[in-house]
Image (cartoon, rainbow, N blue to C red):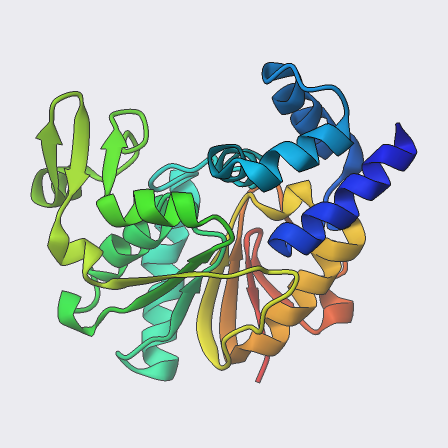
Amino acid sequence: MAYDYEYFKREILSLTTIDLSSYKEKQMKRRIDTLIAKHKIEGYDKYVQAIKSDNHLFEEFVNYITINVSEFYRNPEQWKILDEVIIPGLISRFGRNLKIWSAACSTGDEPYSLVMALSRHLPLKQIKIFATDLDKQVIAKAKVGLYADKSIAAVPDDFKKKYFTQVGPSYKISDEIKDRVEFKEHNLLKDEYPADCHMIVCRNVLIYFTEEAKDEVFRKYFRSLARGGILFVGSTEQIMGYKEMGYERKSSFFYVKPG
């Protein structure tokens, strides 16, 4: 089975550019094995052939392994720091035209949260978020902007009233927020990173990566930030070797590139 999985990883890299070697193997194999069992397919080799010949299976596979768990204003206490300390500091340092990248943005909850958070400090027309994800299906969902009640539970009440409209059991985010976000497919382990970012937001994604892959991404983020720029990470992703990478810690979840 180990040999089969090595073959599977090579085939998936060739098919999708997703390098499964950069993900924690036990977690990833468990997810893939569950998906294979669901379709009653025997073995990795036959599953590879199936996803090569069936576009629905291929899309399902990519969506399933690119773990998409997201919600608006996740960990509200961190967004309070962002609102009261980080954003005013960025505007003071870089002015009002901030370059912000929401990496591994999933279904858009995070970049849309960023637009709303920034709108307390800047006119909407001056806000632009660059948002990327590996999975084109979740990007498509993000562009639709329809969310369950649970996803928007932590959104401040004034923003809920102003920017969301109930559609059946779901809530649709307004076009004036959607228009401030540019979505694009991007592979954190393979593609070039944007340069001179004033803030990069990447939260609760790298926990699925190996330590080596995680370190590589954090180093790339450091190079991608402008001097004085901020990296905002999730509650599960504090950077153990941040000093060696060149970062200074602003608080538990915010790291700055000095200069």
Q: Is residue 253 visible?
A: yes
Where, quadrant-wise, is the C terminus in this rendering? bottom right
Residue 7 picture quarter? top right
Instruction: Count the labels in the image.
Output: 0
At a point 74% along the width and 59% down the height, the residue shown is 215
Between 59 and 108, the one nearer to me in the picture? 59
Work out whether 259 lies above or below 231: below
Residue furthest front in the image: 53
Front residue of this view, candidates 205 and 74: 205
- The answer to whether residue 191 is left or right of residue 85 is right
Left/right placement of residue 40 relative to residue 123 reads right
Choose top left, top right, bottom left or bottom right for residue 37. Answer: top right
- Front residue (pair 186, 163): 186
The N terminus sits in image quarter: top right
Residue 210 place in picture, x, y as percent: 76, 47
Where does the image place residue 164, in percent across and percent down from the top left?
13, 39
Quarter of the image where one finds residue 165: top left
Residue at x 61%, y 52% (from the top left corner): 16
Residue in the image at 57% along x and 38% along y: 53
Give the residue drawn at x 77%, y 24%.
43
Q: Is residue 239 visible?
A: no
Image spot of residue 176 (x, y percent): 12, 57
Q: Position of residue 162 (x, y in %)?
A: 8, 44
